[in-house]
Image (cartoon, rainbow, N blue to C red):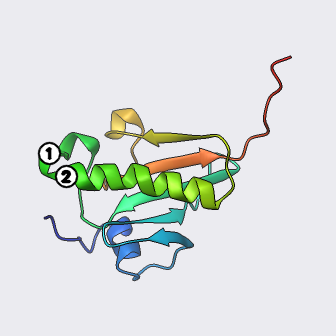
Amino acid sequence: MTKPTQSCVFCRIAQKEVPSEILLENDLALVFADIHPSAPVHYLVVPKEHIETVSHLTRSHAPIAGELILLAKEAAHQLGLSGYKLVFNVGRAGGQIVDHIHLHLLGGWKQVDSN
């Protein structure tokens, strides 16, 4: 297990050193509001273990990876989202800004009628 780092803002949020609007939390991960939302509803699902990117995941991280998705589903339900997007940005070329794996929960758009 990689220990949290003091230079990582997401590690500091997980350790409650940086204030954040935390929606859900368990032993492995937490869900908090993105401070620069790119959707009407935008939360981040972050493991408490410091893992840089999806590229750094190993088979031993399977429980954490699964927990991120399940926690995102719980958060979406709690937020009353009937539809939403889950997005991992991987590396700078993939749009990742913070070097700590995080899953974006995006939603809250008005439903478009297909008729």
Q: CA distance from mark 2 to mark 1?
A: 5 Å
Secondary structure found at label 1:
loop
> From what the image shows, is residue 27 above or below residue 50?
below
* Residue occupying the point 39% across, 83% down: 17
In the image: residue 115, left or right of residue 68 = right
Checking the image for residue 61, the label placed there is 2
Q: Residue at the spot x=46%, y=40% of the render? A: 87
Picture coordinates of residue 51, whole percent (x, y): 23, 56
Amino acid carrying mark 2 in the image: His
> According to the image, label 1 marks what residue?
58
Label 2 sits on a secondary structure element that is helix
Q: Is residue 58 left or right of residue 104?
A: left
- The residue most toward the right is 115
* Disc 2 to disc 1: CB gap under 8 Å: yes
**Kind of residue at badge 1:** Thr
Work out whether residue 89 or residue 8 is closer to the camera in this orientation and state it: 89
Q: Position of residue 60 (x, y in %)?
A: 13, 51
Counting other residues with Cα less than 10 Å from the Cα at mark 1, is it few (<14), some (14-19), or many (20 or more)?
Answer: few
Residue drawn 41% across the image and 49% down it: 69
The image position of residue 96, as x and y in percent, is 39, 44
Q: Quadrant of residue 2?
A: bottom left
Could you tell me which residue is drawn at 19 percent across and 52 percent down? 61
* Viewer can see residue 98: no
Residue sitting nearer the eye, 114 or 38: 114
Image vertical order of residue 10 relative to residue 68, above or below: below
Rendered view: 58 above or below 14 = above
